[in-house]
Image (spheres, grey):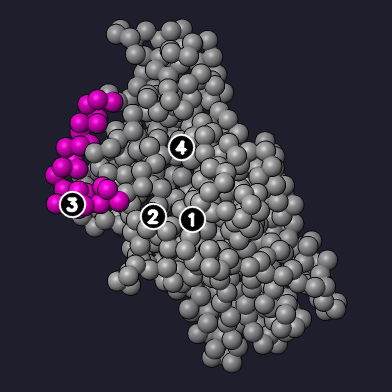
Amino acid sequence: MQLIWLRSDLRLHDNTALAAAAARGPCVAVYLMSPGQWRAHDDAPCKIDFWLRNLAALSKGLDSLNIPLLIRTADRWDQAPQVLLTLCRELKIGAVHVNEEYGLNEARRDAEVARALAGQGIELHSHLDQVLFKPGSVLTKTGNYFQVFSQFRKVCYSRLHHSLPGLAPTPARQPPSGMTSDPVPTQVEGFAPPGEALRALWPAGETEARRRLDTFLDQQIDYYQSERDFPAKPGTSQLSAYLVAGVVSPRQCLHAALQANQGEFESGSAGAVTWINELLWREFYKHILVGYPRVSRHRAFRPETEALAWRNAPEELAAWKQARTGLPIIDAAMRQLLETGWMHNRLRMVVAMFLTKNLLIDWREGERFFMQHLIDGDLAANNGGWQWSASTGTDASPWFRIFNPLSQSEKFDPEGLFIKHWLPQLNDLDRQQVHNPNRHAGGDLFGAADYPAPIVDLGQSRARALAAFRRLPKRQDAALEGLCDQRT
């Protein structure tokens, strides 16, 4: 009997470990509930709810193949070895199959599980699944992990041209085992379920993930490059939560994008090429997680930036979290996060740079808050994005380049449609006024008396951030500037 231990791979199709386990004989699946670990990782309640709903959908699919899904509890991952060992003894399991996960705690957990199983003569088979290339296989000529995305992407493209990762076969229906699946919990203590409005935005299951992918490729991908930065437009795929939970795989996304672009990676539809690049950005940050474990330890990728004199400003941090900074594009973006569990990627950069540069508050405060609220919260991507914005990370925005939220607002939400959707108190303002209701001397609010004044002067706060970064030890910005991939 084979055991497939499901983690962030909640799908039947193109599931490498599931396909491998089923190919070797009858199999049973298990999922470990780990609320203590989820809390330690700051996983959002809406994310846990989304995963449980997808797990329930997957259970039905597994049942159709006569693969029972068992639910066990290992509150913290250090309990996983004993829980799995007990299950293996009960079911006389010959081998356990998993899809690789990345991050320091994940690596330690899997190593301990492998050790415990090996002591009982049970093999742990680990499979490549949530990335296109095994971390450690895409390296510089000197054998190091890439730190600059454009160079990483170039090697990835070269590899993909020669050999495109194939899709794993869907398991065949196996003979009934006589075992019944355990009911999937609908909620977990300590993680309050979100409201139905948020749930309705994120239906569960592979069918929905595939529908989103197909709709995006059919209707939007050709406009992706030109519209992805405009939050009022439906310019993105809305697939990130499904990728993080493994309801759809990066291989499925890549194959579908190539099919829509006549097999081209770097030519054809500019939108398709740009979207494939985004899949590779996701890949890049996974590799960074493995190559530079310190980013899993709440450490800056650039060690010299640990000396930054971050401000302790609890009232300003609270205003940022509660969407009352007095800067409409910031507050509208934070409202989107709080109400939907998701934020448009352009705005993630804008609000992150505002927190870390204009407020000079430690990026780790923002990284944690995002994880606590994002339905697509992912350590690699979230950490990579925050450190990019804070100029502490790999291939980061140079410290002297600071987004101005007002110009970003005017450029990417020119009519103020996004702002007015999330801040209806500004509905009566025109397209000039809505970006900065307080711009006139005397605090003229243009009739939006219930909207707060800005909590910070953008010019003065920018100068303060530049001064703080100038005080850091000598950096290599001059050498790196020409290599950086700027998302401006």
In this rendering, the label closer to the viewer, 4 or 2: 2
**Which residue bears the numbered disc 1?**
280
**Which residue bears the numbered disc 4?**
346
Identify the element where label 1 is drawn.
helix
Q: Quadrant of the C terminus?
A: top left
Up/down of 4 relative to 456, above or below: below
Marker count (numbered): 4
Q: Which residues are magenta?
A: 458-483
The answer to whether mark 1 and mark 3 are in CB contact below 8 A is no
How crowded is the residue under tag 2: few (<14 C-alpha within 10 Å), some, or many (20+)? many
Identify the element where label 2 is drawn.
helix
The answer to whether mark 1 and mark 2 are in CB contact below 8 A is yes
Q: Nearer the viewer, residue 431 or 32?
A: 431
Instruction: Give the Cα distance between marks 4 and 2.
Output: 18 Å
Q: Nearer the viewer, residue 193 or 215?
A: 215
**Which residue bears the numbered disc 3?**
475
Does residue 274 appear in the picture of this structure? yes
Q: From the top left corner, tell me how far across and down residue 255 is, in percent.
A: 63, 58
Q: Nearer the viewer, residue 402 or 90?
A: 402
Q: Earlier in the sequence, mark 3 or mark 4?
A: 4
In this rendering, the label closer to the viewer, 4 or 1: 1
Residue in the image at 73% along x and 60% along y: 58
Identify the element where label 4 is drawn.
helix
Amino acid at the residue labelled 2 = Phe
In this rendering, the label closer to the viewer, 1 or 3: 1
Amino acid at the residue labelled 1 = Leu
**Which residue bears the numbered disc 2?**
149
476 part of magenta stretch: yes
Q: Earlier in the sequence, mark 1 or mark 3?
A: 1
Instruction: Give the Cα distance between marks 4 and 1.
Output: 17 Å
Q: From the top left corner, tell me how far across and down residue 259 is, in percent.
A: 66, 53
